[in-house]
Amino acid sequence: MIDLRSDTVTKPTKEMRLAAFEAEVGDDVYGEDPTVLKLEEEAARVLGKEKALFVTSGTQGNQIAVLTHTRPGNEIILEENSHIFYYESGAVAALAGVQTRTLPGIKGAMDPDAVENAIRDVDQHFPETGLICLENTHNRAGGAIVSPENMEAIHAVARKHSIPLHVDGARLFNASAAAGKDVKEFTRHCDTVQICLSKGLGAPVGSITAGDSSFIQRARKWRKRLGGGLRQAGILAAPGLVALTNMRGRLSEDHKKAAILKEALETCEGISIMNDVDTNIVVADVKERGNTSAEFVEILRDKGILIGGFGPYAVRFVTHYDVSMEQVEEAAEILRSL
């Protein structure tokens, strides 16, 4: 099967497996795992932040950021289709006790003026705005890149009102690769950032949350409270270090694969492309074919292609390391045959 459901399905490379086998380890809760420390140091350097923290998942990294930045009763501002709002099981309410104020975005990017207008006035009737969250690339906008210029403008609003800004950058390295910019061109416009090691970078598990030293000190306690304090975690961190250092440079290959799929889908009668395909995600509408998304998923499954539903009539194709260029070309031929 050609698995295009998500870049989360990647398997660790041989180099990652060997790194895990040979990893020097210690108790990370005591701060004694040398491999975890090395990963955190390198992640902080790459992201341009003072410190970094190895966490079990992107969702945990985002929730730690919300918990660290806010207090119960706060309100957080975020885009209406963002991962934190849409795909994290209501965790900001369940764990942090904050409410969400969602704003519409254009290709995942919120308007800076709208963000500023959404910040609450000082009034006993209103919650305090405790945090602004961005997502880059934006998943439900089809892997869209939120430009550094948009991030900079929203960060300026946040600083003006003394509100921290967090970026869910699970696929931020995809944005960096596609834009041809160093990732620091994005991360300098935020206070904290989460990046995922187990999506496009291919590690088996783990994410990084980064910020200044004070934030990471407080975030470490929240990681412990959430059950994320691990012991000999170097076995997990070692593949993550390989992912961070060796896999970023190949992400543009996944973007080329996505462009091939887009071109093939454009030849299919009754199928329309819904996104600009900035990176490694293609979203298509199949309603004019007379199919629901579930029906179209099954049609392609029967032809040896796995994809995901993305709404009643939308489907999503995601390219990644474990789908070769030959497999993408094969999938494109199958799509053209439709």
Image: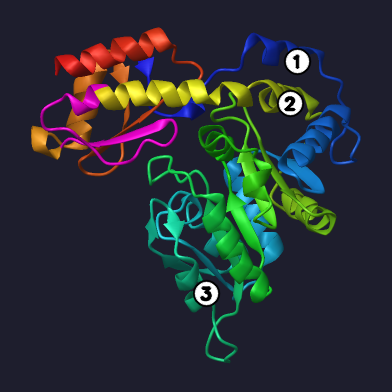
Residue 268 located within the stretch drawn in magenta: yes
Please give the name of the residue rendered at 49% of the width and 49% of the height, measured from the top-left corner: 146
- Residue 204 visible from this viewpoint: no
Residue 69, picture quadrant:
bottom right
Residue pictured at 34% horizontal, 39% vertical: 276
Residue in the image at 54% along x and 28% along y: 200
Label 2: state its secondary structure: helix
* Relative to 113, 210 lies left or right: right
Question: Where is residue 305, by image quadrant?
Answer: top left
In the displayed structure, would residue 280 be above or below residue 94? Answer: above
Q: Position of residue 23 (x, y in %)?
A: 82, 18
Which circle marks residue 116 in the picture?
A: 3
Label 1 amino acid? Ala
Whether 231 is drawn above or below 304: the answer is below
Q: Nearer the viewer, residue 203 or 116?
A: 116
Disc on res. 32 = none
Residue type marked 2: Leu
> What crowding class fits label 1: few (fewer than 14 Cα within 10 Å), some (14-19), or many (20 or more)?
many
**Quadrant in the picture for residue 280:** top left
Dot placed on the residue nearer the N-terminal end, 3 or 2: 3
Residue for badge 1: 19
Which residues, given as a range, are shown in magenta?
264-286
**Circle 1/circle 2 CB separation < 8 Å:** yes
- Vertical placement of residue 24 versus 95, above or below: above
Residue highlighted by disc 2: 241
Q: Is residue 280 magenta?
A: yes
Residue in the picture at 69% in, 54% down: 192
Mark 3 burial class by Cα count in 10 Å: few <14, some 14-19, many 20+ = some
- Cα separation between marks 3 and 2: 38 Å
